[in-house]
Image: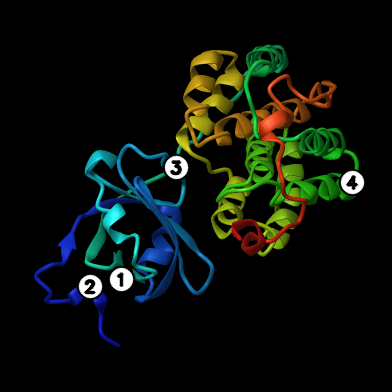
């Protein structure tokens, strides 16, 4: 097979990047074709034949845990010129799409939050986040909020009911990362990272294993991949920072503001998931998430029924 990275075409452009350790195995495997899932000014999303999803992004883009990051900013992004290229290659330490070659020149590890504080500290952090989220507009419909409440209510006591609620959230909403998936990512991460004892981690792992088994085909490829990363404790820095702030009851408002810059409503949806997961992590807390927020409804009602596939959502 001809190695696409060895092209003698003078138009070939090489731009080294910094790659997440979470995609090292996929990047270092032999070169194979990849599908282009989407091309945006700050990022390109690709999937290899095994279903591994990789985000090729600029330095100022949201750094997902599966990202290969260029040094340049989105103002000088080479991605818009690649919009017509639907095929790419991944492997042998690089990504190739059209004339662009991006070798992994260095590696980075997705962040983890500091250890959470005691019960009173975590509860104060939850209260601060709950208050700050009241006026925030979200993509979650009233039904999605009810599913999230059911998830938090039953995750520690009734795994089947919790899973049924999670399943209703998967793929709920339009876009590359539907709102239901974003909330579920925030929930799984907060439950795993803020639980005061190992039981919370076990609940998150057991639920996460079922979610990742059923997410493919029910949501987009990118969103299914991010759910898988959340199950393993990985998320973008803005999300991890908020979870850490809630656990330590410090800088909750500044961290929430930074997370709200992610996507159209993704940041708000992730934050609502964090609140639900943080409250569920403490068995003595009664989740205060059943009612629809003031920012919910109207133009942000989600038009897609639960369980629609990624292809149907994109149609």
* In front of the other: 104 or 54: 54
Residue 161 — which label?
Answer: 4
Residue at the spot 26% in from the left edge and 47% down from the top edge: 77
Residues at circles 2 and 1 in contact by the CB criterion of under 8 Å: yes
Label 4 near label 2: C-beta < 8 Å?
no
Q: Marks 1 and 4, how far apart in space?
A: 44 Å
| x, y percent for residue 270 | 61, 34
Q: Which residue is mark 1?
A: 92
Q: Note whether residue 20 is visible.
A: no
Tell me what residue is drawn at x 65 percent, y 41 percent. 179
Query: How far apart are the two marked residues, 2 and 1, measured between alpha carbons?
Result: 9 Å
Q: Nearer the viewer, mark 4 or mark 3?
A: 4
Mark 1 lies on a secondary structure that is: loop
Instruction: Choose the circle earlier in sequence order: 2 or 1.
Output: 2
Disc 3 versus disc 1: distance between alpha carbons? 22 Å
Assess disc 4: are there few (<14), some (14-19) or many (≥20) residues with their C-alpha within 10 Å of its C-alpha. Answer: some
**Element type where label 2 sits in the image:** helix
Q: Measuring from the top left, give residue 212's x and y in whole percent.
A: 68, 57
Q: Are marks 1 and 4 in contact (CB under 8 Å)?
A: no
Circle on res. 110: 3
Give the structural element (helix, strand or loop) at label 3: loop
Residue 5 badge: 2
């Amino acid at each position: 097979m001809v190695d696409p990275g060895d092209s003698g075409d003078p138009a070939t452009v090489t731009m080294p990047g910094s790659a997440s350790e979470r995609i090292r195995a996929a990047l270092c495997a032999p070169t194979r074709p990849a599908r282009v899932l989407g091309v945006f000014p700050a990022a390109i999303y690709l999937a290899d034949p095994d279903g591994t999803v990789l985000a090729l992004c600029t330095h100022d883009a949201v750094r997902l845990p599966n990202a290969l990051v260029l040094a340049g900013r989105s103002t000088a992004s080479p991605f818009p010129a690649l919009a017509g290229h639907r095929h790419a290659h991944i492997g042998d330490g690089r990504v190739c799409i059209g004339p662009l070659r991006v070798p992994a020149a260095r590696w980075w590890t997705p962040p983890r939050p500091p250890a959470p504080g005691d019960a009173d500290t975590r509860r104060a952090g939850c209260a601060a986040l709950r208050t700050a989220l009241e006026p925030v507009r979200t993509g979650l419909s009233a039904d999605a909020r009810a599913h999230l409440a059911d998830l938090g209510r039953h995750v520690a006591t009734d795994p089947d009911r919790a899973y049924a609620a999670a399943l209703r959230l998967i793929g709920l909403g339009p876009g590359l990362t539907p709102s239901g998936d974003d909330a579920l990512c925030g929930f799984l991460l907060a439950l795993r990272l803020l639980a005061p004892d190992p039981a919370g981690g076990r609940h998150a792992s057991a639920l996460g294993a079922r979610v990742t088994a059923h997410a493919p085909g029910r949501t987009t490829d990118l969103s299914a991949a991010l759910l898988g990363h959340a199950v393993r404790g990985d998320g973008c820095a803005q999300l991890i920072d908020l979870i850490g702030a809630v656990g330590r009851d410090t800088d909750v408002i500044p961290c929430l503001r930074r997370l709200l810059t992610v996507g159209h409503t993704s940041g708000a949806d992730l934050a609502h998931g964090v609140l639900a997961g943080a409250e569920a992590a403490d068995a003595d807390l009664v989740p205060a998430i059943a009612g629809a927020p003031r920012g919910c409804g109207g133009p942000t009602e989600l038009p897609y029924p639960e369980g629609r596939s990624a292809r149907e959502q994109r149609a």
